[in-house]
Amino acid sequence: MLKIDEKDIKILRCIDEVGNSNIDEIAKMTNISRSTIHYRLKKYQESGIIKGTLVDLDPIELGLDITAIILVNAVYEKIYAEELGEKLSKIPGVISVYYVLGGVDFILICKAMDREDLKRVLRDINSTEGVIRTGTHFVAATIKEEKRILVNYPEEMLKKLFYSKLNRK
């Protein structure tokens, strides 16, 4: 059971802001000792709060100029969500797969190099067993695409989140 305090919130928010777990940088930004940060980073990794290391790559600089949102309708079968979702997630260019409730079964986010690459992704999706049809939305402009979680919440909301969720486990 992981207990979260004010120092944890500062450290986690800083990690989320800078996109890495550089102890010196976190210590400087939070005014928390290096040894405390080192100990707590290890605690976060062991508890599963931190998974890997975030590096923020720019898709446009990498040549992935097209973003598409693809709505997928699928044949309903027992446990199809997990199996089909897994198949869809393996298609090159598909960066996110969400199983949703409502008028569609899955929402996929795709990054493509150009129109031909997007057509390839759509062919791969539509040829996947279990997919009935797709609807594609071409993103004209990205207003916000945030991979970091905590930077979107003010500190008071983070305290409420951590104290209510993590401290009652």
Image (spheres, helix red, strand yellow):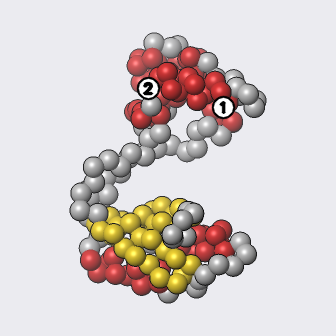
Q: Which mark is residue 23?
A: none
Residue 130 drawn at (x, y percent): 59, 83
Callout 2: helix, strand or loop? loop
Question: Which amino acid type is shown beneath numbered disc 1?
Answer: Lys
| Quarter the N terminus occupies | top right
Q: Are marks 2 and 1 in contact (CB under 8 Å)?
A: no
Q: Is residue 11 visible?
A: no
**Residue 24 drawn above or below residue 124:** above
Residue drawn at the location 56% of the way across and 78% of the way down? 74
Residue 167 picture quarter: top right
Task: Using a 10 Å C-alpha cutoff, classify the residue at mark 1 as few (fewer than 14 neighbours), some (14 to 19) or many (20 or more).
Answer: few
Query: Residue 10: x, y in percent?
Result: 50, 21
Identify the image quadrant of the C terminus. top right
Which residue sits at x=46%, y=44%? 54
Whole-percent x, y for residue 126 in the image: 47, 84
Q: Which mark is residue 165?
A: 1
Between 22 and 78, which is closer to the camera in this rendering?
A: 78
Q: Secondary structure at mark 1?
A: helix
- Measured along the vertical axis of the image, is residue 8 above or below residue 139? above
The structure residue drawn at horizontal position 23% and vertical position 62%, both measured from the top left corner, is 140
Mark 2 or 1, nearer chain start: 2
Q: From the image, tell me which residue sits under label 2.
A: 154
